């Protein structure tokens, strides 16, 4: 059976460059932030965004307990404001849309309006041969609408500049799926 999390990392790994810049646009509990921190190495930079203090605290605790390299900046702000914090091109960007796992608050989710801005800006900031992974969780109403919006939006990008793919389990319509945006 296909493991989507493993597949995502299989796509991302060839784009990782030690000493480069990466971003976790939805830090959640810090799993992707930790993975990126280790992959970027001591000389790299990782920016991680979330709007919830609980996410920032959980991520900081995870990074410290796992002895992650001190190459990360945790940002308590919307991913739609990424250009206020990141000025360098990014080699890898990750989005896990939806709500904070384990928070118990499924009403507080990422939103189409801010996701559209964040994804557009993240694509603009992708370095040559950079990659953006966007995981969508259509099991709740806003997640389904975000997925539809992204499908329509990403279809408008030039195939000569970007390779954009979608990976979905066809016979499970509410299962998570993801987009990969690769800059040529």
Image: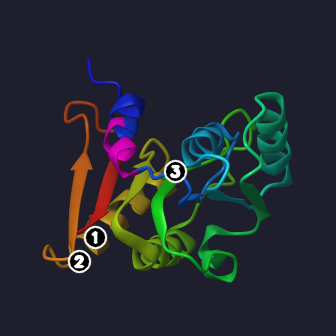
The correct choice, above or below, for 48 with respect to 156 in the image is above
Write the start and end of the magenta stretch as one range: 10-15
The reply to whether dot 1 and dot 3 touch (C-beta < 8 Å) is no
Q: Main SS of the magenta segment?
A: helix
Number of residues whose C-alpha sits closer than 10 Å to that of mark 2, classed few (under 14), some (14–19) or many (20 or more): some
The reply to whether dot 1 and dot 2 touch (C-beta < 8 Å) is yes
Q: Which residue is mark 1?
A: 154
User: Distance between the Cα atoms at labels 1 and 2?
Assistant: 6 Å
Q: Quadrant of the N terminus?
A: top left
22 horizontally vs 102: left or right: left
The correct choice, above or below, for 140 with respect to 171 in the image is below
Q: Which residue is mark 2?
A: 157
Q: Quadrant of the C terminus?
A: bottom left
Labelled disc at residue 177: none
User: Residue 2 in the image: x percent, y percent?
Assistant: 27, 24
Q: Is residue 171 visible from the viewing direction of this image?
A: yes
- Earlier-in-chain disc, 1 versus 3: 3
162 horizontally vs 103: left or right: left
């Amino acid at each position: 059976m296909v493991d989507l999390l493993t597949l995502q990392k299989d796509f991302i790994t060839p784009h990782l460059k030690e000493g480069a810049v990466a971003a976790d646009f939805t830090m959640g509990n810090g799993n992707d932030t930790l993975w990126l921190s280790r992959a970027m190495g001591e000389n790299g930079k990782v920016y991680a965004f979330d709007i919830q203090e609980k996410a920032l605290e959980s991520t900081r605790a995870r990074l410290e307990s796992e002895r992650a390299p001190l190459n990360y900046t945790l940002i308590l702000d919307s991913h739609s404001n990424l250009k206020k914090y990141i000025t360098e091109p990014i080699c890898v960007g990750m989005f896990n849309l939806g709500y904070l796992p384990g928070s118990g608050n499924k009403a507080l989710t990422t939103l189409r309006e801010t996701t559209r801005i964040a994804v557009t800006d993240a694509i603009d900031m992708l370095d040559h041969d950079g990659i953006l992974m966007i995981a969508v969780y259509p099991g709740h109403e806003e997640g389904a609408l975000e997925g539809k919006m992204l499908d329509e939006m990403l279809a408008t990008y030039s195939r000569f500049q970007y390779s954009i793919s979608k990976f979905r389990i066809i016979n499970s319509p509410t299962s998570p799926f993801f987009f990969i945006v690769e800059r040529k």
